[in-house]
Image (cartoon, grey):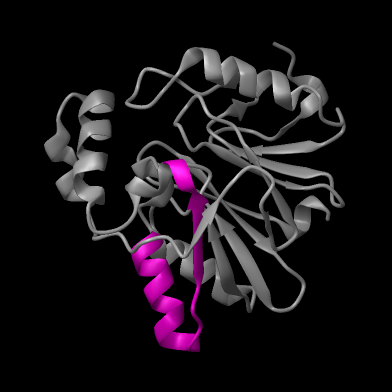
Amino acid sequence: MSDKNITLLVVGPIATNCWIYPLGDGTAAVIDPGDEAEVIISALEKKSLVPRYILLSHGHFDHICAVPKLAKAFKDKAQLSVQIAIHKLDSEYLGPNAYEVHKKSVKAAMGIGALLDVFWKDMPPADILLEDGSEIGPFTVLHLPGHTPGGAAFLDKEAGVLFTGDTLFRRGYGRTDLPGGNEQQLYQSLSRLQTLDPNIKVYPGHGDTTTIGSEKF
């Protein structure tokens, strides 16, 4: 799949990459809808796409803030049940008890947990709990803990593309000092990525695209 088929929307106060990935049948996977649900919805409508999956690379709030509005909008407009998917070890970031989990993360990141209230919408539960090796649409799930316990990447091997969330960036990688972070696990996850085809195009959670071969640690 060429770059022109993948839409990048940079959303939210810390510039999170939200990716729209067409699935070839008028539907799409929306990866990490971090904020600005109206912008994401408008982009989908302009391309005559409806989301079949909302894929979350991990549970941090800047990657899932738009989930409630996005899922509801297409259920109402298209009578479509959008499937929300996250690794099972990050499932606590969704559902009825998610507020307290996010509050701890926001407090650790920004010093004040109450900042969450500005953005908060009740989170729906996950429809699909992912594991390493799970297949969803064209993607195989790679479990990559370290940034969070349930960090995951989505690999379309046939297309040669990988969505890495906050595990791997261009010339960088995710922080490990937030709740659930683990530096040793992150390095193991990065080492695992180094075993992949170096030509695979990497679409990260923040910043510019890169390739596996360009990132050496």
The residue nearer to you, when weighing 157 against 4, is 157
- Coordinates of residue 31 in the picture (x, y in percent): 56, 53
Total tally of numbered discs in the picture: 0
Kindly identify the residue that appears in the image at 69 percent across and 11 percent down: 217
> Above or below — where is 75 with respect to 5?
below
- Coordinates of residue 98 in the picture (x, y in percent): 26, 50
> Above or below — where is 128 with respect to 60?
below
Instruction: Using the rendered image of the protein, determine whether residue 171 is visible from the camera's viewpoint.
Output: no
Kindly identify the residue that appears in the image at 49 percent across and 79 percent down: 81
Q: Residue 172 lies in what quarter of the image? A: top right
Determine whether, in the image, residue 178 is placed left or right of residue 116. Answer: right
- Coordinates of residue 209 in the picture (x, y in percent): 69, 35
Give the magenta-colored segment's residue range: 67-89
Kindly identify the residue that appears in the image at 46 percent across and 65 percent down: 127
The residue nearer to you, when weighing 66 against 58, is 58
> Above or below — where is 22 with respect to 214?
below
